[in-house]
Image (cartoon, coloured by chain):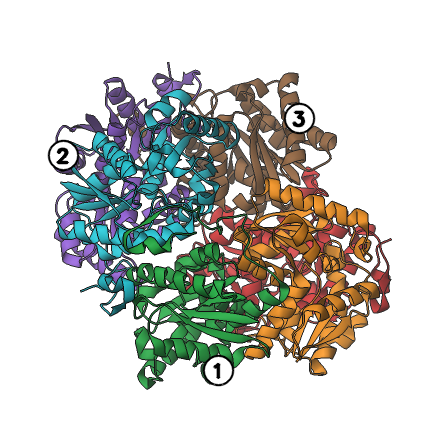
Chain colours: A brown, B purple, C cyan, D green, E orange, F red
Amino acid sequence: MRIHVVNPNTTEAMTEKIAAAARAVAAAGTRIIQGQSAMGPASIEGYYDEALALPGLLQAIRVADADGADGHVIACFDDTGLDAARAVAKAPVVGIGEAAFHVATLVADRFSVVTTLSLSIRPIEHNLSRYGLGSRCARVRAADVPVLALEERNPAACDRISREIEAAIAEDGTDAIVLGCAGMADLAAELSAQHGLPVIDGVAAAVGLMETLIRLGHRTSRLGAWRPSPPKPYAGLLAGFALG
Amino acid sequence: MRIHVVNPNTTEAMTEKIAAAARAVAAAGTRIIQGQSAMGPASIEGYYDEALALPGLLQAIRVADADGADGHVIACFDDTGLDAARAVAKAPVVGIGEAAFHVATLVADRFSVVTTLSLSIRPIEHNLSRYGLGSRCARVRAADVPVLALEERNPAACDRISREIEAAIAEDGTDAIVLGCAGMADLAAELSAQHGLPVIDGVAAAVGLMETLIRLGHRTSRLGAWRPSPPKPYAGLLAGFALG
Amino acid sequence: MRIHVVNPNTTEAMTEKIAAAARAVAAAGTRIIQGQSAMGPASIEGYYDEALALPGLLQAIRVADADGADGHVIACFDDTGLDAARAVAKAPVVGIGEAAFHVATLVADRFSVVTTLSLSIRPIEHNLSRYGLGSRCARVRAADVPVLALEERNPAACDRISREIEAAIAEDGTDAIVLGCAGMADLAAELSAQHGLPVIDGVAAAVGLMETLIRLGHRTSRLGAWRPSPPKPYAGLLAGFALG
Amino acid sequence: MRIHVVNPNTTEAMTEKIAAAARAVAAAGTRIIQGQSAMGPASIEGYYDEALALPGLLQAIRVADADGADGHVIACFDDTGLDAARAVAKAPVVGIGEAAFHVATLVADRFSVVTTLSLSIRPIEHNLSRYGLGSRCARVRAADVPVLALEERNPAACDRISREIEAAIAEDGTDAIVLGCAGMADLAAELSAQHGLPVIDGVAAAVGLMETLIRLGHRTSRLGAWRPSPPKPYAGLLAGFALG
Amino acid sequence: MRIHVVNPNTTEAMTEKIAAAARAVAAAGTRIIQGQSAMGPASIEGYYDEALALPGLLQAIRVADADGADGHVIACFDDTGLDAARAVAKAPVVGIGEAAFHVATLVADRFSVVTTLSLSIRPIEHNLSRYGLGSRCARVRAADVPVLALEERNPAACDRISREIEAAIAEDGTDAIVLGCAGMADLAAELSAQHGLPVIDGVAAAVGLMETLIRLGHRTSRLGAWRPSPPKPYAGLLAGFALG
Amino acid sequence: MRIHVVNPNTTEAMTEKIAAAARAVAAAGTRIIQGQSAMGPASIEGYYDEALALPGLLQAIRVADADGADGHVIACFDDTGLDAARAVAKAPVVGIGEAAFHVATLVADRFSVVTTLSLSIRPIEHNLSRYGLGSRCARVRAADVPVLALEERNPAACDRISREIEAAIAEDGTDAIVLGCAGMADLAAELSAQHGLPVIDGVAAAVGLMETLIRLGHRTSRLGAWRPSPPKPYAGLLAGFALG
């Protein structure tokens, strides 16, 4: 099976790191197709970046979908564009945020999230409520590390994440940690060993859930709001995005 | 004061109708500045259209904001881009969906929403939950009328909306109706008289709430997630959207 | 338009201060009619005072309503008697507590309330739940200042309120402050400038919302529980309160 | 032990019926003291009546409390004045609405309420939410019977209640019925036998809970908002209600 | 009336203490029948013990039920086996956890629980959510005392419980304490006097609620999921548990 | 990897069917170890059966765990004994109910459950609330088919399930169906094709999730309540269940 793992920002190093994390956990027979947005922000930090990341993300998904990808993983922890991607792709779509939350609930009654910037706390909290899993999350924390500082294994950034995990264990009454950024994908195993609790990376979680969906033959339901928008004219710079 | 009322789709007739509804209820001294997206879909029906409406909407808001608008009203009932608009504009921003919900709660313990397509029911329900007002909404209903059918006073469309209101009164245990589309702005008074309960139009409601915010001098808080994204490079077709 | 702003306690100095705050934000063409209860407690602190404030409040509202007021604002932060007032008045009614909460959500994802006595925390929390806005409130705090200490600008009282705002910013993860007493109406602008976040006063907020309701022609729905009680005999001291 | 069962309306026949229901279930050694409001509405139907019932109810409770009652039961299903009564009485206070809900949860996972007028549905729903038991209630229904029609065993009224119970069983997925009016106290056993499910009367339930509180020595906590209001002047018609 | 108070663990000293607590508060005419599991764990600490306590508990209940007990009280604070007991017994069943919560809400707007081991916090929290009373509980705390350490009045254990109550008053914004273990039944009155707030013991509370149910003639509804499982073969070690 | 799929009832035909369903979706390299309870009920219908299924289930899990299973799947839709199993097993544990719910949310905004007997509706609803996914479930329905009627492909049973799915699509506003019994595992693909929406079987879903957990190296957290009970004596028939 072919799983399209798409980075909705335009930073190649991050795309590579995400793809490597996906390949590291993929089952035999799974091929990871590495995708990246061709337009928009170099990283997604806050609502403005998120809004402008959508066109490039959706374009990448439409292209890979037409090329026959069996599933799409959106590799941004705030699950940027998940609704629109599901509405437009034939293949199923999973976000790494939701994937991490679902997997965490299987090994932890309650988990804390450690993300990058405090700017991301509320969007993550709103996603948790929307998914129904707010009651399973003890707290969303920020390590105060910019997304691109995670590109290479920056010791100061790792240290801040580690201290935030310690605080979560001491103060939140939590059983597990969810890492709140695709750029942290390479840290999970080490942090789990170091702190003695499950540490969940969303990229790995999403690959596992997507393999399950594909093997079981499940596709996005068209009965709800995840249907393509009815065809209509699109104007200006985005005229090319009109659905046939 | 100058209130920028922006239509996030590219259909001029709808922009005109919205601006007329806004002007009809504006206080003496309020000037309505009519705005419209310059790119993207001709109407917003479903998540894909909504995602592609964001760049044009945010561009229109940034321009009007730089021109000194005292407030922005987003005239699409699903409150398209509200978070991103708040994050990027200096002036306060109100969506017509949230405005209608808040005003409805002042005259009704519980309200029903009547929107256009069933595709829009879930996004509206999710907004209600996010805003905290889900418990005040008895039900979100669709009249099965495409958005652009409302451009001119189409008797068949009006009739469907009217029948949906009757059903809401009979079945939902509701006290008021919120009209779930900017294109219904001209119908509220008539439907209220006809059905004997408050019927709320979001455009009018949003103008009132925005006048209140401006008169009281309230601006969007920067302490939460409604802060501009940190400056960074933007690539490709959307390179021009990078924040200074 | 004529808006009746009624103080449900019997302290004239507070009535004057509330009316001044209302007039300061009223639109051109709005006339503020100053109302006051003629019986009951000198201030409302706790459930017993609140219960005994109801007859005087409802009498004042019935008189102003019969005199043709276009709307009523109940100027007590716990929205004393709001349900009964809506049930008995022809004109719409807004409480300053609910008004402040609604306005706060337009500029802040989450707000904290700073009220007078700890006795008032629970009633405010219960109101927030009832209105549906509990998820938008980070915390309700008390500055430990008696209501009547706010009559004149008492520096010690202001200082306590200011310290509670600082604590809210540091500990609650809040984006804005709602002032939880009609007697704080004159402090909002100054505290907002001082602390760098929106500070919402309910009297000002309620006048804005009421102007909106009146301009849009919305009246309290009679389909729910906000209907006059069926006429019946009233006995004893309160015999005069029977509905015609 | 002496339990003061107080009817917050002024209709003597209803006071008698309530006291009889209380005496029928009281344990050996329990003395039921029959109380009645001396002022206000002849029955409580809607928010206006409820507000005006408070002074008479609180006066009756203060008198019985000073006379050494060991506990007070407020015999109106909407638990009129429960917060204020708890704040002002030395002895514990239980409302018949809350009592019925608590007892119902011990024999039924989910229950429906059958009350008198549709005007009472929302206040009961709001109470359920406030108490935390909203998730245990399948539905609140009205039999469309005025309160005072229940004074004598009116066959038409009984029939309507019976039909509403049938509808609840067929449509609500409910396991038990809570009778939503003190005036229905004499119907519970018969309706339970007739319909084959638990039927709970609040007067009987409240007497049982109050005996438990008294035997266990529990009194209303003063740490929360159930504390007497601080002493202060009261004006006008209600001057006599000032707390010493 | 005869109330069967059953200890679902196999420790006789604890059974005696529980029965003594029950007898101390029982009304004149109530006979407490002391029950104990004949198989399984010596104390219930965590989910594994709880699961293995069920057969012995259900056997004891079936025997006492056949012997004509008028009601059953399950004397373990996590309400072990409450659903299954209700499904299989003719007489009504009350758990001491739920009993304590219900009684606490009658004298406190919000309560904290002080239990034995931290292992028990989550099961108690889940019970509170299930019962609907989660919003009434400020916090569930553990005193870090093993269940069997409470068998005799261990001063160190009492001291830890007392300190946890102090912490609850200082930090939780709570109005009352619920003691979270049957083994604490003898401490309630003393702790209440010492800390100046209601302290609720579940054994006493459950006896009171059960007397109420029996006096009112209420039995477990069979309309929901509290029905006996349909008869079927049982195999192996548990073959004797098959329902006739 | 070796996944232990355990049937908590004692019916061999059902154990075989479950194992076949598991093998049909297992990845290359996954070995399904078929497990079955050696004591207790022949099927689990209602709370009494569920309670008595626990000892046999936990014994089977302890044996397979000691034998080196990499993960355990509990193949009963009400997730019988999930907490206790997690507390006692070294390897991770997934229930087929929770697995089906999580997978359903990835392809459907809202799903309905179709289970066997109405007796099972409430336990499933309570599980959904506990897991946090209640808001994602439109309705739990029963097809009125006994569990063992599903052993062989009974056309009448299939027809009832099919009609319930049609009703769910027509009435619930649902996007997908979750089959609420391990005995329906062989029907999912066919029903999905027939009704045109995703139909989720929990056995298949749980195998996929378990493969993901094992491949990612995640184990049950010991920080919360999923820890082994402290060692202690066990008495009587169950003496052999004491933890070392």
Q: Quadrant of the N terminus of chain C?
A: top left
Mark number, residue B23: 2
Q: Tell me the residue at 37%/69% (across/down).
A: D141
Instruction: Looking at the picture, tell me which residue is in the foreground, A239 or A47.
Output: A47
Instruction: Looking at the picture, tell me which residue is in the foreground, C41 or C144.
Output: C41
Report which residue position mark 3 lands on: A162
Query: Label 3: chain?
Result: A
| Type of amino acid at the residue the image marks with label 3 | Ser
| Type of amino acid at the residue the image marks with label 2 | Arg
Residue E238, x across and y down, in percent: 78, 72
Q: Is residue F46 above or below residue A123?
A: below
Give the crowd class for mark 1: few <14, some 14-19, many >=20 residues within 10 Å.
Answer: some
Query: Label 2: chain?
Result: B
Residue B210 left/right relative to C196:
left
Badge 1 element: helix
Res B156 visible: no
| Residue C196 occupies quadrant | top left
